[in-house]
């Protein structure tokens, strides 16, 4: 069935005119009808618009447009509800934006459309990207396609679940502390967080401006390379996007990683690491050695401080970024006698508990008398964390770690203890603080129940070519990425 | 420095965020716990360490001071909770 294909496979069939874009899009919509009542990856999807885009793609194919010119021509790609798509709802998984319809396209959406993609759907997420389980959405939770009593991860839970459940060929999510890599690991797909500044954030509703990056979820590494090539690049509308040329990422997937050095940070082999996750990662490391890579033990001494630094910096930046949701220019409004009461009531009614928690924490660490002790100190420790990585990259080409300490936990298991939830991000969080790139790829499953386990690779700043080459070589020597959940009954 | 009494009410006011009394109590307890955990940052010696505000080597990114098209007026008002005469309607600010 067409919805089960990868970007490469579907593009080839479309190019040969074996199938039409309309058929491919319909296949995804049929799958959504079949499984989304259980999975709930989608908050909404505009089927008429999606099929109209598919029709336009078919016309382009008939007119001779090739995938060399438009790499995603006719490919259905769904997007996280945090990205602006013109004339589509934009809610960020929150009530506070009310019936907001976006008046513009995010840069990445413009690029997807220019590459011929069918951009559809609003994928479920933790509200304003704050969370690790997609339990914080105002639109209900998303379930893991491998076990619907478990979380898919977060905050891009819908984006990961949609790919894992073959409801879209690929999706976009965003990653601030692991929100692409962690759900990718828990749902058994590929999730890539590009280097900070590699992809424009224009049109991404901001959570933490110095940490956020948009990235793809795909069924294999080659597709991730294709997606990155489309969405990456400097954008004058995002002054934090870096004027670094976009290379041909697919060209670096040679399969040859002989002599490349992979660092194993000793601080990541911690007590709370699930034995099955450890076993899967150990086996992956052996596999890398078989492929000719050299494993080097390294140290990232400030690993243990990552969660603390993150929850000061990210919440501080979030408290500033979410100040704009005040009921004045857009979104839901609760009236007040004066503007301040209006703001207060609107925000009190519109934000969920996790968002409120982080706004309050962020406001506190920036407030007079506490700024130096918390925010400034956290920024200095951030330098130490970044330096740990830059020093490591003097001797290794990439770093290998588990993506998460455990496989997917049960719905409700950590929702009462925010600190426990935060600590589960321990492996992904430093990557955003250091501004480097990272990818999670499938590396095995737990026994009972069968749940995906993710392997994380961390690369140098703008080192995605090497990162993807290493990920691809491992992937192609295993079959993990071919497995599908039994629940899909395909 | 031990974690001071976390004044949730005061911080909520700074954040223009209305909290119900039970929310205040619950948040106070949870944030007290989180701040307790964050205290571990005090263990580190950060003398002479420069803060990192963002991880890219970019400074003073500017563009020429030229007028460019911006969001059309009608589009900007389209999502307004209340509007009149091409303006956003708000409660009275000045007496």
Image: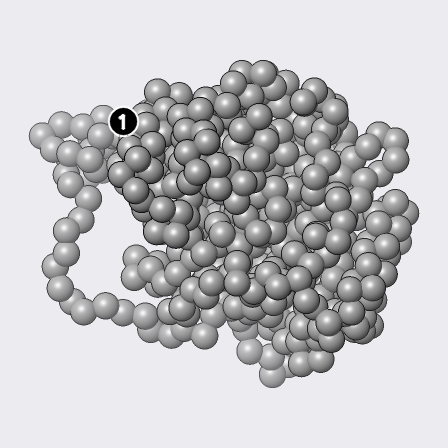
Name the residue at 62% across, 29% down.
A165
Name the residue at 76% across, 49% down.
A478
Residue A167: horizontal and vertical position, in percent? 55, 28
Work out whether residue B15 or residue A267 is closer to the camera in this orientation and state it. A267
Name the residue at 59% across, 31% down.
A4
Q: Looking at the picture, does residue B60 appear above or below residue A163? A: below
**Quadrant for the N terminus of chain A in the image:** top right
Q: Looking at the picture, does residue A357 appear above or below residue A282? A: above
**Of helix, strand and loop, which one carries label 1?**
loop
**Quadrant for the C terminus of chain A in the image:** top right
- Across the whole image, how many numbered discs are drawn on residues? 1
Work out whether residue A394 or residue A167 is closer to the camera in this orientation and state it. A167
Q: Determine the image quadrant of residue A487.
A: top right
Name the residue at 80% across, 44% down.
A444
Whether residue A417 is visible, yes or no, is no
- In the rendered image, the residue lying farthest to the bottom is B48
Q: Determine the image quadrant of residue A55.
A: top left
Along the horizontal axis of the image, is A95 left or right of A167? Answer: left
Whether residue A246 is visible, yes or no, is yes
Q: Determine the image quadrant of residue A431.
A: bottom right
Q: Which residue is mark 1?
A: B81
Pointer 1 indicates a residue of which chain? B
């Amino acid at each position: 069935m067409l919805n089960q294909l990868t970007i490469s496979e579907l593009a080839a069939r479309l190019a040969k005119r074996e199938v039409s874009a309309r058929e491919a899009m319909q296949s995804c919509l049929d799958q959504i009808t079949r499984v989304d009542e259980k999975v709930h990856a989608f908050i909404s999807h505009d089927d008429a618009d999606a099929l109209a885009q598919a029709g336009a793609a078919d016309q382009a194919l008939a007119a001779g447009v090739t995938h060399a010119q438009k790499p995603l021509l006719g490919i259905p790609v769904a997007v996280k509800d945090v990205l602006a798509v013109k004339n589509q709802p934009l809610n960020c998984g929150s009530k506070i934006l009310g019936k907001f319809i976006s008046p513009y396209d995010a840069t990445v959406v413009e690029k997807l459309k220019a590459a011929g993609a069918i951009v559809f759907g609003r994928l479920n997420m933790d509200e304003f990207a704050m969370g690790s389980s997609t339990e914080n959405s105002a639109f209900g939770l998303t379930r893991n396609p491998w076990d619907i009593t478990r979380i898919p991860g977060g905050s891009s839970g819908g984006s990961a679940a949609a790919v894992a459940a073959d409801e879209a060929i690929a999706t976009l999510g965003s990653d601030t502390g692991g929100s692409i890599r962690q759900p990718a690991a828990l749902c058994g797909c590929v999730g890539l967080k590009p280097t900070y500044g590699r992809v424009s954030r224009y049109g991404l509703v901001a959570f933490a401006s110095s940490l956020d990056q948009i990235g793809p979820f795909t069924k294999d590494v080659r597709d991730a390379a294709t997606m990155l090539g489309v969405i990456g690049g400097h954008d004058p509308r995002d002054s934090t996007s870096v004027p670094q040329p976009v290379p041909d990422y697919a060209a670096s997937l040679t399969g040859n990683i002989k002599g490349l050095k992979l660092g194993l940070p000793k601080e990541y082999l911690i007590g709370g690491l699930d034995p099955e996750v450890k076993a899967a990662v150990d086996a992956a490391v052996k596999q890398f050695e078989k492929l000719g890579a050299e494993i080097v033990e390294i140290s990232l001494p400030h690993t243990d401080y990552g969660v603390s630094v993150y929850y000061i910096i990210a919440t501080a930046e979030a408290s500033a970024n979410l100040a704009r949701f005040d009921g004045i220019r857009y979104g839901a409004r609760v009236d007040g006698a004066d503007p301040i009461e209006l703001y207060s009531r609107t925000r009190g009614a519109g934000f969920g508990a996790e968002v409120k928690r982080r706004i309050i924490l962020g406001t506190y660490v920036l407030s007079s008398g506490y700024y130096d002790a918390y925010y400034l100190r956290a920024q200095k420790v951030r330098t130490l964390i970044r330096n740990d990585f830059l020093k490591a990259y003097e001797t290794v080409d990439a770093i290998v770690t588990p993506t998460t300490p455990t496989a997917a936990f049960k719905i409700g298991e950590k929702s009462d203890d925010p600190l426990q939830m935060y600590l589960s991000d321990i492996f992904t969080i430093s990557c955003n603080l250091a501004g480097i790139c990272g990818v999670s790829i499938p590396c095995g499953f737990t026994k009972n129940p069968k749940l995906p386990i993710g392997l994380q690779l961390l690369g140098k700043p703008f080192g995605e070519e090497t990162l993807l080459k290493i990920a691809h070589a491992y992937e192609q020597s295993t079959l993990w990425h071919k497995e599908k959940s039994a629940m899909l009954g395909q | 420095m031990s974690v001071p009494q976390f004044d949730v009410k005061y911080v909520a006011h700074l954040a223009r965020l209305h909290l119900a009394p039970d929310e205040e109590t619950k948040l106070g307890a949870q944030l007290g716990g989180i701040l307790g955990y964050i205290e571990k940052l005090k263990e580190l010696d950060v003398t002479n360490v420069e803060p990192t505000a963002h991880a890219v080597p970019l400074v003073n990114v500017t563009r020429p001071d030229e007028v460019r098209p911006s969001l059309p007026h009608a589009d900007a008002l389209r999502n307004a909770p209340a509007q009149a005469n091409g303006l956003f309607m708000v409660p009275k600010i000045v007496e």
